[in-house]
Image: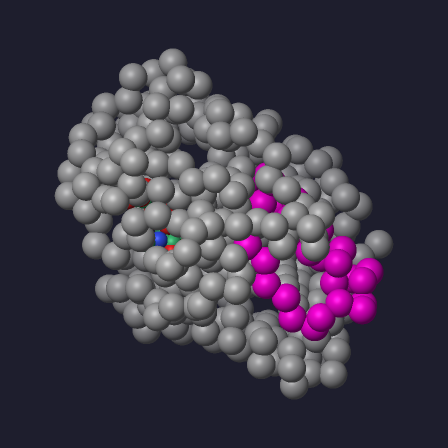
């Protein structure tokens, strides 16, 4: 049985990936500093899979702790590296915090991987590296543009660090997965997205408005050059995204003849506007959402969606869930989570 270290495994995408890995027969170890997640997520993973992954609270920026961790856990075959801060606005206010947290942790991890020889890395990257692409849908060949935020820059620099390390290393191979907009929750509603404070992202804001925690959703602009004037994104179900990580891990572990470093877009291949998201949410929830059009959000990209051909053909992966199913899962999670919170 392969041992997979999932850093950031109590986070939103990390926890869904841990579930899919366990269900595919992998032994999962989770390392997370809990800076933006809750250890109770481990209970959710256990309830879904019947397996409790070994969890350690650890900050990857602490080199000596990470060293100890690898010494204590020999036999790690591969790493999926999610652990990173991801709030765009916060990164503009605290750039050094973002560079330190997202880059030092990666460098420490790569150094330990060199020392302890897990030769396979899957990295959690973002379509943010494309900025506003000149051509849509965006392929992996599109140029990486100057990042709009320190957060985006950490993803771009991280990809470069990984590519350079792979090139110099005799044994390390890596895949960077560039996510478009992951949304939704596990179908059991036992794990999901847990934004701290006021959510930055659209779907948690929609579900929190629908359940009455927020007064209204602000739609950031309806004067873009899109059919209805609101921004367009490629929203994919987090479980579909999680499955892609399992596929990538299998490719690295079993298929040694591939290129040493590869990059894949992960999206549905379909662009959906903010107003379409609202309409679809209203349809699946039966709730009339309170929303108001406001000014544009600084730094927003007008429209972006993925060309997923490479992931479809090379990884054999495809996003399967419909937008309706995905939004329904987000809504189910919001209701379940509030009920749990009220009970405690
Ligand atoms: C943002 C980041 C992206 C990052 C991701 C991580 C930018 C430009 N992009 O993605 O790099 O990887 O977060 O979480 O910041 N919207 C509203 N009202 C809201 C919230 C959002 O209208 O209250 C709109 C936004 O203008 C956007 C869409 O909804 O058009 C999606 O926004 P969001 O969920 O924040 O994702 P991104 O901006 O695509």
Q: Residue at x 65, y 71 (%)?
A: 261
* In the depicted structure, whether residue 252 falls above or below residue 335: below
Left or right? Give the position of 62 relative to 24. Answer: left
Quadrant of the rendering where the C terminus is positioned = top left
**Where on the picture, by quarter, is residue 66?**
bottom right
| Image location (x, y in percent) of residue 265 | 55, 54
Q: Nearer the viewer, residue 286 or 42?
A: 286
Q: Residue at x 53, y 61 (%)?
A: 140
Quadrant of the rendering where the N terminus is positioned = bottom right
Q: Main secondary structure of the magenta part?
A: helix
| Image location (x, y in percent) of residue 60 | 53, 68
- Whether residue 286 is visible to the viewer of this picture, yes or no, is yes
Left or right? Give the position of 253 relative to 165. Answer: right
| Image location (x, y in percent) of residue 48 | 66, 33
Q: Residue furthest top?
A: 286
Left or right? Give the position of 21 relative to 109. Answer: right
Image label count: 0
Q: Nearer the viewer, residue 152 or 74?
A: 152
* In the depicted structure, whether residue 118 falls above or below residue 191: below
Q: Residue at x 53, y 41 (%)?
A: 268
Residue 246 belongs to the span the image colors magenta: yes
Magenta region, residue range: 238-265
| Image location (x, y in percent) of residue 14 | 57, 50
Q: Residue at x 68, y 79 (%)?
A: 114
Residue 334 belongs to the span the image colors magenta: no
Left or right? Give the position of 282 relative to 170. Answer: left
- Whether residue 64 is visible to the viewer of this picture, yes or no, is no
């Amino acid at each position: 049985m392969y041992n997979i270290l999932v850093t950031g495994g109590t986070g939103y995408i990390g926890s869904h990936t841990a579930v899919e890995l366990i269900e595919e027969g992998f032994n999962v170890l989770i390392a997370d500093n809990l800076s933006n997640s809750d250890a109770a997520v481990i209970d959710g993973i256990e309830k879904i899979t019947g397996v409790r992954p070994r969890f350690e609270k650890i900050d990857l920026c602490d080199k000596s702790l990470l060293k100890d961790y690898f010494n204590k856990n020999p036999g790690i075959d591969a790493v999926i590296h999610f652990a990173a801060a991801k709030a765009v606005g916060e990164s503009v206010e605290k750039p050094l915090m973002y560079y330190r947290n997202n880059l030092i942790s990666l460098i420490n991890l790569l150094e330990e991987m060199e020392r302890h020889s897990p030769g396979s890395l899957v990295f959690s990257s973002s379509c943010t590296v494309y900025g506003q692409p000149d051509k849509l849908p965006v392929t992996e060949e599109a140029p990486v543009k100057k990042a709009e935020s320190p957060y985006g820059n950490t993803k771009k620099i991280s990809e470069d660090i990984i590519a350079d390390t792979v090139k110099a290393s005799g044994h390390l191979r890596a895949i960077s997965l560039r996510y478009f907009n992951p949304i939704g929750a596990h179908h059991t509603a036992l794990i999901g997205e847990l934004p701290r404070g006021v959510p930055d992202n659209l779907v948690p804001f929609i579900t929190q408005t629908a359940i009455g925690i927020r007064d209204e959703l602000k739609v950031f602009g309806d004067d873009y050059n899109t059919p209805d004037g609101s921004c367009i994104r490629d929203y994919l179900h987090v479980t579909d995204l999680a499955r892609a990580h399992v596929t990538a891990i299998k490719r690295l572990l079993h298929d040694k003849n591939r290129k040493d470093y590869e990059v894949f877009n992960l999206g549905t291949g379909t662009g959906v506007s903010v107003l379409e998201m609202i309409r679809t949410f209203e349809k699946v929830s039966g709730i009339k959402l309170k929303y108001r059009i406001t000014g544009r959000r600084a730094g927003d990209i007008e429209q972006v969606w993925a060309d997923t051909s490479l992931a479809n053909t090379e990884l054999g992966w495809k996003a399967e869930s419909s937008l309706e199913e995905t939004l329904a899962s987000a809504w189910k999670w919001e209701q379940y989570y509030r009920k749990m919170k009220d009970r405690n």
